[in-house]
Amino acid sequence: MTTTAPVRELQKNYGTKAMALAIGISLVFLILGHKAVCRGLVMGALFSTINFVLMAQTLHLKIKHERSRASLSALGNILFRYTFMAIPIFLAIKFPRFDLVATIAGLFMVPSVILADHISRTFLFSWRK
């Protein structure tokens, strides 16, 4: 029995929620005339979602190796993902079309959705008891 189906379901669930939230907030800023904020938020959320998928896809590679190789592999994976997450920050600093603060907020979109989901589940289950 493999765990790829639940992992992909989680990826799809959190990624969809994060992108929908980012697009919804971006539409508000677009209506208000802040195009740079809109672009930065969507770009950050897109990179956040891709980072989450990369993290889930490479997780199984860290478990099978011996301890020292797994540690080196995990370190390399973290460095790669942090470098990947630096791309939208670099673009937001370099180009005025993207708002830096909105881009950074977009990078935290998937973790925010995961945290909100966990908090809502915790409070829903605590209210039922």
Image (spheres, rainbow, N blue to C red):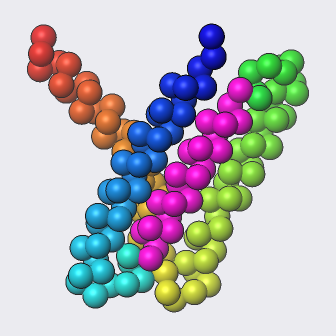
In the picture, measured across the screen, residue 9 lies left or right of residue 24, that is right
Could you tell me which residue is drawn at 19 percent across and 26 percent down? Answer: 123
Q: Position of residue 100 (x, y in %)?
A: 48, 75
In the picture, measured across the screen, residue 57 lies left or right of residue 43, that is right
Could you tell me which residue is drawn at 63 percent across and 74 percent down? Answer: 90
Could you tell me which residue is drawn at 48 percent across and 32 percent down? Answer: 9
Residue sitting nearer the eye, 70 or 57? 57
**Above or below — where is 28 with respect to 14?**
below
Residue sitting nearer the eye, 82 or 56? 56
Q: Position of residue 125 (x, y in %)?
A: 20, 19
Asked whether residue 98 appears in the rendered view, the answer is yes
**Above or below — where is 89 with respect to 14?**
below
Q: Residue 14 lies in what quarter of the image?
A: top left
Q: Residue 87 lies in what quarter of the image?
A: bottom right
Residue sitting nearer the eye, 73 or 52? 52
Q: Residue 73 lies in what quarter of the image?
A: top right
Residue sitting nearer the eye, 101 or 128? 128
Asked whether residue 101 appears in the rendered view, the answer is no
Q: Position of residue 79 (x, y in %)?
A: 74, 49
Could you tell me which residue is drawn at 61 percent across and 36 percent down? Answer: 56
> What stretch of residues is rendered in magenta?
39-60
Tell me the quadrant of the picture where the C terminus can be found.
Answer: top left
Q: Position of residue 109 (x, y in %)?
A: 42, 54
In the picture, measured across the screen, residue 77 lies left or right of residue 47, that is right
Tell me the quadrant of the picture where the N terminus can be found.
Answer: top right
